[in-house]
Image (spheres, rainbow, N blue to C red):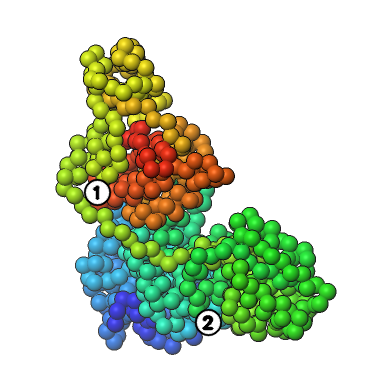
Amino acid sequence: MSWSEALLNPRRIALIGASSDAKRLTARAQIYLRRHGFDGDLFPVNPRADTVLGEPAFPSLEAVPGGPVDLAYILVGTQHVESSVEACAAAGARSACILADGFAEAGPAGRALQDRVVAAARAGGLRLLGPNSMGVINVPSRTACSVNAALAAEKLLPGRWSLVSQSGSVMGTLVSRAEARGLGFAKLIGTGNEADLTAGELAAALVDDPETDAILLFLETIRDPERLEEAARRAHAAGKPVIAYKLGRSEMGAQLAATHTGALAGADAAVDAFLRAAGIIRVDMLETLLELPPLLLGRRPPEAPKRAVEVVTTTGGGGAMVVDRLGLAGIAAHMKDVTLAGASRASMGAAIAEARSAPDADLAIAVVGSSAQFQPHEAVAGVTTSTGALPVCAFLVPQADVSLRLMAEAGIAAFRTPEACADAVRAYLDWRAPRAVPDAPHDPALAALIEAALDEPGARAVFAALGVPNSAMAVDPDDPPPLTYPVALKAVSAEIAHKTESGAVALNVADAAALRAAATDMRVRLGGQITGFIAQPMAKGLSEAILGYRRDPVVGPMVALGAGGVLAEITRDVVLRVAPVSEAEAREMIEEVRAFAAIRGYRNLPRGDLSALASAVAAVSRLVAYREVSEAEINPLIVLLEGQGVVMADALIARAERHA
């Protein structure tokens, strides 16, 4: 038996530390397993009791008859977890789940304890869920191996999608909220600290689960992005949508890096880019996580979405609420109000069928008023029986539990709020297939340049080797070479990251005398920080860009493109992608930067060299092949007229060891 089968569908379960006091938390797993019909072998392990809650108890795991257990739920206190895991490994248990807290989240001592626990498990071939895990629930097999209080319910509704949650309490929250809509789950897994098994590995196991059609993720962080992306790619190939609700939209507590890119590419923006690249649909509302799956099941990501919908409503106010929220998401909506015709099967069905045939829309939305509450079967029939090429979903304006259940039975996504409806439509239209990853080969010669890139000339050499033009040269201000004036003069320093703020840049230097004077001024003010000077011809472009690369600590390599210059962090007009990117992806990034509208030919304004800009973006993104680079930035990158290229005005590379 594989670890995933043992964990998700165990037939032999040991409860280590099971309590005979029904009021204690550590008694709940046994109570819930029996309440919800577990018919496998159950072994309470308690050395101080002969029976636990009326069932024979065993003093140790070794005393359990019949050979190894599939799953051991470790319910003991933190101080006893290590020995319990060692006992599980020695007894040949295939999987174990740890309830206790006080591990990596508690500081260095807890981290050390967690590392020892994982090492003991791996030495015995044991896979661990947790610590801080509320367990595993398999609804179809009636296995509620959890202490979550939501399992006090008399029954659990089975469903066709599964949840991987880093929060144990959220498992119960979603079970109750789903039940109110007539929805259920196949599997629910609380991952806790993910000391061993991660959300990515568990999602991959659900891809192979024949009882799971969609995978829902509640994420507080992403601990293993590579495995999560691999799972999402496999899920896409299998036709199983992966939907994520990820905490961390705000920037509170974000750690900004040394470059402007670090400030712009906040942690959540990087997560957004990662999820999109992996083909994972991200929702902004917890309600949407539950209500969206029927809209995605059996479908593939929309190709070239028009970002337009047809709204058919039996209530003008209700329809307007949806249209208003869609507008905030940048989605156009055409509304047809059929209030006077009523919500009968015939009238609503005809209007929905027409909407689902619209050639200039992506989907149809039915908005149903009071009839959804008082005449549910008639109110939803026109929606559930409608046909058409476009998908359909519904917003039910009143509280209409029966209609929600009828919609669920028909496989129609139904929403209880206009906000969730708009969020779901936005998520559907943002849905993309996992991207094809371009090659980013490792070049030893470039690696040597990166090793030597201690200052701006070194960084420029790296970018030039990648393919970004470099027009700067080293100069001796006391004996300058022939230059094409006016020039920009810059002090070279490994200690000064942002030269404009430090006064290490002089612009529009007119001649050799002005060059000497500017250099003398910098030497007086900056002293020993200066190791040399570079100069380059002044360039007057159409726009300034910031082009950056960053190895995000959560989700890995990112490339950022946005409006550049000294105001980059104020405007925050930036787009992120997972690195590396192709030139086609780079062109998509250019299209998304609002400040670049002018150089895209807006109102017949001169076009910038977008091809050269896209080439530079793709080139910088290939730094992904060099793990020693933690951050890199060109700011500004001046975009010249179409056909004239781009100019690197400032360059910076930060090596990983300098951020250790």
Q: Mark 1 points at which residue?
A: 626
Other residues around mark 2 within 10 Å, as few (<14) / some (14–19) / many (≥20): some
Secondary structure beneath label 1: loop
Q: Is residue 449 above or below residue 195?
A: above
What is the x, y in percent for residue 242?
45, 69
Q: In which quarter of the image is residue 422?
A: bottom right
Which residue corresponds to the image point at 39% horizontal and 22% vertical from the top-left? 507
Q: Which of marks 1 and 2 is nearer the N terminus?
A: 2
Q: Is residue 45 left or right of residue 120?
A: right
**Position in image of residue 137 (x %, y %):** 46, 76
Q: Position of residue 327 (x, y in %)?
A: 65, 57
User: Mark 1: which amino acid?
Assistant: Tyr
**Closer to us: 521 or 628:** 521
The N terminus lies in which quarter of the figure? bottom left
Residue 22 tag number: none
Residue sitting at the far right? 340
Residue in front for this viewpoint, 33 or 442: 442
Q: Which amino acid does label 2 sit on?
A: Pro
Residue 332 visible in the snapshot: yes
Give percent across and percent down for residue 345.
74, 84
Left/right placement of residue 4 relative to residue 603 reads: left
Q: Is 68 displayed left or right of 259 in the figure?
A: left
Mark 2 = which residue? 158
